[in-house]
Image (cartoon, rainbow, N blue to C red):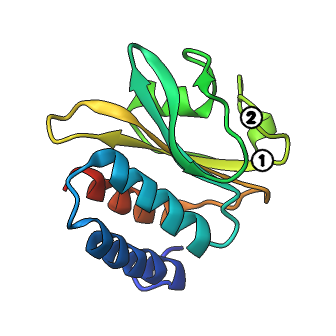
Amino acid sequence: MMTKDSAKILKYKRLYQQIEELTIPVNSPISRMATISAVLHHKMKGYFWTGFYLLQDGELLVGPYQGPLACLRLKKDTGVCWASVNQRKTIVVDDVEEFPGHIACSSLSKSEIVVPVINKDNVLVGVLDVDSRELANFNEEDRLGLEMIVELIYK
């Protein structure tokens, strides 16, 4: 059971404030995504790959990220990122090997969370994708925290 003041939620709230302060001077979604990727990647335990895939001409192409090399383009309507795009919701995967059509950019990835990025016009522009080397690394607290942080991109 999750409580509002769990240690993980409090950490996400602190990171939200930090990212908000860092990104106020710049009204660039790409710059904000780069900052979000860097802060989350270096501050959250278990984040192995942290970054964005952006919709461009009907394709999901890699955007700002931290971690090992990424797939540049994700096969249409396949994997966790496309599932998040198509369902317009956050998806948490405890074991990527059990997700139908999972795209393995790195065999070291074991669990994943993908959060849709929606702009001020309610248009889905991409996703925040976070991978972990640990099974079941993400939960409801991560969903809530990351959804809150993603809102800073177009604030």
Position of 116 relative to 83 (above/below): below
Q: Which part of the image, by quadrant, shows the N terminus? A: bottom right
* Rendered location of residue 99, percent (x, y): 71, 33
The part of the image, by quadrant, that contains residue 13 is bottom left
The part of the image, by quadrant, that contains residue 77 is top right
* Rendered location of residue 126, percent (x, y): 40, 34
Question: Does dot 1 land on a helix, a strand or a loop?
Answer: loop
> What residue is rendered at 31% in x and 78% in y?
17
Query: Quick one: label 1, few (<14), some, or many (20+) residues within 10 Å?
Result: many
> What residue is rendered at 58% in x and 61% in y?
139
Q: Amino acid at mark 2?
A: Cys
* Rendered location of residue 105, percent (x, y): 74, 34
Residue 84 visible here = yes
Along the line of sight, the residue nearer the viewer: 31 or 154: 31
Of the two numbered discs 1 and 2 in the rendering, the one whose residue sits closer to the viewer:
2
Residues under labels 1 and 2: Cα distance? 8 Å
Residue 129 visible here = no
Question: Which residue is tagged 1?
Answer: 109
